[in-house]
Image (cartoon, grey):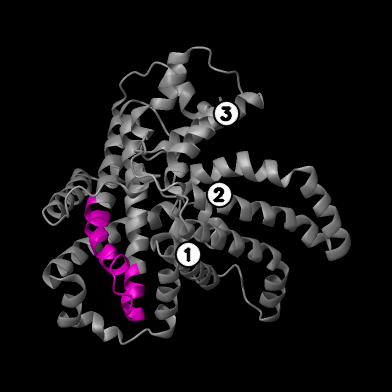
Amino acid sequence: MLVLNVGILIYLKYWRILVGSKTLLLPLGISYYTLSTIGYFMDIYNSKYEKETNFLKYFVFVSFFPQLILGPIVRYNQSGVQLKEEHAFDFENFKHGFMLILYGSLKKYLVADLLVKHVSTIFDGVYTNYPGCVLLTGILMYAVYQYADFSGGTDLVLGIAELFGIKLPQNFKQPYFSTSLANFWQRWHITLGGWMRDYIFYPLALTKIMQNLSKWATNHLGKHFGRTLPACIANIAVFMLVGLWHGPELHFFIWGLYNGLVIALSDILKPLFEKLNEKLHIKTASRGWHLYQIIRTFIIVNIGWYFDRIVDVKKSFIYLKNTFANFGNPRLLASKNFMNQIFGNITDFQSHIVLVVLGSLIIFVISILKENKIDVYKSIQNKNIIFRWAAYYIPLILIILSLSFSFGDTGFMYAQY
């Protein structure tokens, strides 16, 4: 069954592109439920829990409709067990699920759907000579768009599941507040990272070959290299696979390799950075240092987004170079004639950006509260009725308003994976 699942995934997702076939349709979300089933068979093989003898119950676990298209990549002991249990109607679960749906809709329809066309205008056009200020604006819009689209879709999935009394695992944890690239990947698409860790990273890092490499590195390069080298190699392999999980195109592979190499280098150079911080008398526990780490990580992540977003690898390097070497005059962004040349109708663009900024501010405030361990839902429920209704209706009104400006049904970006 394991070989069958892997074979179907490779054939449907990769073979059609490798042989140039355009007639084979790709089922939506195939990677999500395929990885869930592979994880299930691996767990059964490793005796983590007993196998499900009732095929219907197993089928319900695999095909639970909220998670089919966007994930999360669930384990059987997370959702399969819940799906077998009886669930009486719980009004608190229903309210919490509704709030998740509302929050996810705000991310998707108020932010992501109003950005998607403008991001495409910059990165998918034939014109490649944009000044860096435009490219930087485009990649920042893409960073916001991708997070709003994917995490918004995940919130919708979790909210719908909770209406049925099923709690699915979280997939995002304020990733743009990460203090390192490794930390970012512990907060972004958490279930994919967990799957790769358990079924690829650890099995690879603990092989006999890696153990021998660790001993050799310890003897010839020191204890630090002996500890980190196998993990670095396994990390690079994992992120190349993460890139290929998105698709067989070269730009995804380079994006995955970039992430793996940055994390590997940061692990290898960690003692050097620690000594440098000590010599410079940097207070690594200070808020200023914490803020610096967040900004640094955000820049590193956004450099990677160039390779993730731009299909033409040569074009991605040109855009990345121009962002730094040909930044141009930022005042161009305030020029109506210049912006009209890029986006067409500047009035529509400005209207979209106003709504996006409002939605992003709401997301930002909620993210700060969650980052500080504040349960936003409980906090809202503990406020007076005016505050509660405002928390419900202001996002709802903004969502409805955004629909009049939207570009139609844009779908979910990560459904194609």
The numbered mark, 3 or 2, whose residue comes first in the sequence reads 3
Callout 3: few (<14), some (14-19), or many (20+) C-alpha neighbours within 10 Å?
few
Residue 158 lies in the magenta-colored region: no
Callout 2: few (<14), some (14-19), or many (20+) C-alpha neighbours within 10 Å?
some
Q: Residue at x 17, y 68 (%)?
A: 349
Instruction: For mark 3, give the secondary structure.
Output: helix
Residue bearing the label numbered 1: 304
The numbered mark, 1 or 2, whose residue comes first in the sequence reads 2
Where residue 281 sits: x, y (%)? Answer: 66, 79
Where residue 256 sits: x, y (%)? Answer: 53, 57
Instruction: For mark 1, give the secondary structure.
Output: helix
Residue bearing the label numbered 2: 241
Q: Is residue 52 above or below residue 301?
A: above
Residue bearing the label numbered 3: 2
The numbered mark, 1 or 3, whose residue comes first in the sequence reads 3
User: Quick one: quadrant of the C terminus?
Assistant: top left
